[in-house]
């Protein structure tokens, strides 16, 4: 057997091995997510009646077994009804798992306090269920409400005096999806217009779904008013949902799609470069012509002018620093969306939310997001419409 033949023969085996490792990892995570709440609420010394244990076990098993096919049908086959159920189930089990884990810390405290079972375990169960229900109700209300306005001043060294006080409204991660939020979208547009912005920026993840499926939810974006510009860049979710079609559709709504390009806005003789790059996942998406290209986005710009860059992910800040960008606007993190997912996000992104400095010149503002992805809950991570007022340093 030749070397080439040996490599070709080994490739399918490696693919099978990777698939098996992935399946084993997912199975272990699922068993932990569903298993810990089941054990905490039903078996850990509670001594519930047999009917309660049996009923709870059947419910937990049904949730565990139904979740993967619902998720595949919802986000693989784009069946909105399945996505709504699976996403809600994911949010519920994440919050329940978190507080079951913390509940077992309470169990240790009760042991030290001399509280015996079944009182100890039943106290833990009541606390876990009570906190979970409160957080889910509050988190749902937070996710579905029109976001509050977050006001931030950003001082830029190179900003011209006529541009001092420029009002930039940032929205991001609207994630128009399986839950119809056309009225919510109209409410967001009303909030934006009430701020009388000079520039409105959307930094991607506009929708989960194709233009044809989410057209009505995106329609209110056509009514957004801005004195100088409305600009948009793609996020990673566009590359699951027809990125080029969203770029073209945003243009029909009157927005400048900054697909590795820039525009220049002017007020009182002073100018500002507004540039945009594709999401960092664009290059591997297979969509022709899509990849993050800072050089192309800034080609032809006056090096003395301040630069405002739109890039979906905070992780793209290194490119901004390398190209002397003054301020990058990003989203993607959702501020963690459901605590304590915040800590997992920070393993992938340099910033979770807010204004930060990177290098001598470049600042980054990361929004917590205007909408939500998947689970219709926001816990300790409120959504926002951001009003950034640019000031001379």
Image (tube, helix red, strand yellow):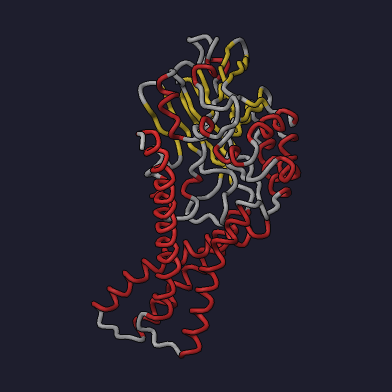
Q: Which residue is farthest front?
A: 1
Q: Nearer the viewer, residue 29 or 114?
A: 29
Q: Position of residue 305 (x, y in %)?
A: 51, 12
Who's the residue at 69% across and 40% down the image? 189
Who's the residue at 43% across and 29% down the image? 317
Who's the residue at 29% across and 85% down the image? 116
Q: How many marks?
A: 0
Q: Position of residue 229 (x, y in %)?
A: 66, 24
Judge whether 305 appears above or below 21 on screen: above
One can see residue 390 in this view:
no
Quadrant the N terminus occupies: top left
Toward which corner of the image does residue 139 lie, by quadrant? Answer: bottom right
Toward which corner of the image does residue 138 lie, by quadrant? Answer: bottom right
Q: Position of residue 90 (x, y in %)?
A: 53, 60
Q: Position of residue 105 (x, y in %)?
A: 31, 69
Who's the residue at 45% across and 38% down the image? 354
Left or right: 275 in relation to 146: left
Judge whether 298 appears above or below 329 on screen: above
One can see residue 62 in this view:
yes
Judge whether 180 appears above or below 272 on screen: below
Left or right: 253 in relation to 384: right
Q: Nearer the viewer, residue 20 or 368?
A: 20
Quadrant the C terminus occupies: top left
Q: Nearer the viewer, residue 290 or 233?
A: 290
Toward which corner of the image does residue 206 lie, by quadrant? Answer: top right
């Amino acid at each position: 057997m030749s070397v080439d033949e040996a490599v070709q023969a080994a490739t399918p085996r490696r693919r099978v091995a990777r698939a098996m490792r992935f399946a084993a990892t997912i199975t272990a995570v699922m068993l932990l997510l569903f298993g810990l709440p089941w054990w905490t609420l039903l078996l850990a010394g509670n001594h519930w009646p047999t009917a309660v244990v049996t009923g709870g076990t059947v419910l937990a098993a049904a949730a565990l077994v139904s979740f993967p096919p619902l998720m595949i049908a919802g986000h693989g086959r784009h069946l909105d009804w399945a996505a709504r159920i699976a996403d809600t189930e994911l949010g519920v089990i994440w919050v329940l798992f978190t507080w079951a884990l913390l509940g077992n810390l309470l169990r240790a405290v009760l042991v030290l306090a001399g509280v015996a079972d079944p009182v100890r375990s039943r106290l833990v169960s009541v606390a876990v269920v009570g906190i979970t229900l409160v957080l889910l109700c509050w988190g749902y209300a937070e996710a579905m409400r029109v976001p509050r306005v977050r006001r931030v001043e950003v001082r830029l060294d190179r900003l011209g005096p006529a541009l001092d006080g420029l009002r930039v409204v940032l929205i991001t991660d609207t994630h128009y999806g399986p839950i119809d939020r056309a009225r919510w979208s109209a409410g967001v547009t009303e909030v934006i217009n009430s701020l009388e912005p000079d520039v409105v920026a959307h930094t991607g993840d506009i929708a989960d779904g194709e233009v044809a499926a989410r057209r009505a939810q995106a329609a209110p974006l056509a009514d957004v008013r801005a004195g100088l510009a409305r600009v948009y860049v793609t996020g990673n979710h566009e590359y699951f949902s027809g990125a080029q079609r969203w770029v073209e559709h945003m243009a029909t709504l009157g927005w400048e799609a900054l697909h590795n390009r820039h525009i220049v806005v002017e007020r009182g003789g002073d100018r500002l470069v507004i540039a945009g790059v594709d999401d960092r996942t664009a290059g591997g998406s297979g969509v022709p012509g899509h990849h993050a290209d800072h050089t192309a986005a800034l080609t032809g710009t006056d090096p003395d002018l301040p630069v405002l860059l739109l890039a979906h992910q905070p992780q793209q800040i290194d490119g901004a620093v390398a190209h002397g960008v003054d301020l990058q606007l990003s989203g993607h993190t959702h501020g963690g969306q459901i605590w304590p997912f915040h800590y997992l996000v920070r393993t992938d992104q340099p910033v979770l939310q807010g204004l930060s400095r990177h290098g001598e010149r470049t600042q980054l503002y990361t929004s917590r997001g205007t909408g939500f992805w998947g689970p219709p809950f926001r816990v300790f991570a409120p959504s926002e419409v951001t009003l950034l007022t640019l000031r001379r340093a």
